Amino acid sequence: MTAIVFLLLLFGAVPIALVLALSAIWYIQASGNEVLYASFAQQLYSGIESYGLLAIPLFMLTGELMNEGGLTRRLIQAARVFVGGFRGGLAYINLLANMFMAAIIGSAASQIAVMARAMVPAMEAEGYRRDFAAATTAAGGLLSPIIPPSMLFVIYGVLAQIPIGDMFMAGIIPGLMLSASFFVIIALVGLTQSFPKGKWMNRSEALAALRDCLPAALIPVAIVGGILLGVATPTESAAVASLIAFLIGRFIYRDLKITRLGALFVRTATSSSLVIFLIAAANVFGWVIIYEALPQKLAGQITSITSDPFVFLLIVNLSLFVIGMVIDGIAALILVVPILLPIAQMHYDIDPFQFGVIVCLNLVLGLLTPPVGAGLYIASAMSGTPPMQIVRALYPFLIAVALILVLLSWAPILTTALI
């Protein structure tokens, strides 16, 4: 009965955090074990009682400060130096700039919104089809949950109780593989479409663009370098990155206005509070799942189908793709990890870092697939392109992601080599 209530609320357009909390309340009432109500508030609080979760609002703040401070625009100009002269150069610039942004923002939805505003009009003005420009920008957002830092990696690290810094390292090789595959796709699509010829900057323009970009480049260096050298935790690195973004935007680029900080902080607080409340509510729902021994029951069913870790991961990939189509990525992550991770570790001896990268990449696909597809609708709203036109242009990128997921499932070394 609890499952029916969960589905009715979910498809009744009730916010997912309330779906999780109300389903847990229904379970307690239906079970007759009302003493569990005494632990309800404690379970809500324990879901967010993690130092690592502080990185989420700090990374969001960094992204907001970058946008207001003009750092994003300068990173795009720097990308133009390296790939702007190729035929289809602006498409390559879009992806390269997305790689830079992925190393800073950590949120796919935020990255798609930022880059769609900047890149889609520019690509359309140079002769690219609008649906392809929007699709390339949306696909670039898929790099955000893989290239560190990543909001999903932070949440997964907390749920799996593994070092978040090591989780970031696990995403580097898959992130580079994904980026390379997207560059290949643009080259192949360019063979069938007549992309505009790019234009290389002259020496003085290139030097000026790189010089202007150097301060902004300090942010990913501070984040990843601090973690790699063991100088700072991911949370501390996020705080340092926020401070650097503020100082650069205010005192070096001078684009950041003090009068706009109030609205900036409100946006950051609103966005991060939604995520944090979702985590708290999901912890209560996860408590119900554990109380009902659902992981053990599911493990018995899956292990009766296969004993091969690779086949198990293929089943997980297919299941997560369907789940990601109807449930937000963060909510889905919080729901499935407590159920599937123990099965993966105890019954198939799968490394938690490999499992985390696969789960996070798979679930973020839901951002670009109907019917939920928040990232798809963000790209549509920012570009003025119908969602289904973007989906049709996205197919080559989605196929590349699927192939990368199969490869990551088959070869654990791709995620564990740098840890």
Image: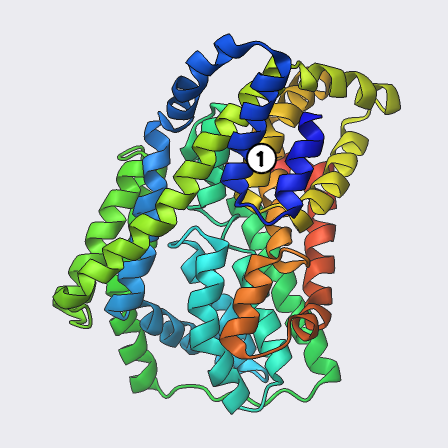
- Whether 340 is drawn above or below 384: the answer is above
Seen as rendered, the residue at the extreme right is 305
On the rendered image, what quadrant is the N terminus found in? top right
Q: Is residue 95 left or right of residue 11?
A: left
Tell me where residue 121 appears, x and y as whole percent. Answer: 48, 83
Residue at (51, 79) in percent of width and height: 120
Question: Could you tell me residue 368's position as x and y percent?
Answer: 63, 59
Horizontal side of 106 relative to 402 (left or right) equals: left
Q: Which residue does the image show at 74% across and 59% down from the upper left?
A: 399
One can see residue 61 in this view: yes
Where's residue 251, x and y in %?
12, 66
Q: Is residue 65 above or below residue 382?
A: above
Q: Is residue 62 visible?
A: no
Closer to us: 18 or 295: 18
Residue 89 shown left or right of residue 342 in the figure: left
Across and down, in percent, residue 91 comes to 55, 76
Which residue is drawn at the image coordinates 68% and 54% (left, top)? 401
Residue 298 placement: quadrant = top right
* Residue sitting nearer the eye, 6 or 226: 6
Estimate how packed mark 1 is, as few (under 14), some (14 to 19) or many (20 or more) residues with alpha carbons within 10 Å. Answer: many
Residue type, label 1: Gly
Give the color scheme: rainbow, by chain, secondary structure or one colour.
rainbow
Is residue 360 or residue 42 the one in the foreground?
42
224 shown above or below 389: above
Above or below 398: residue 151: above
In which quadrant of the rendered view does residue 196 lie? bottom right
Q: Which residue is mark 1?
A: 356
For numbered disc 1, what is the local secondary structure? Answer: helix
Q: How many marks?
A: 1
- Along the line of sight, the residue nearer the viewer: 24 or 392: 24
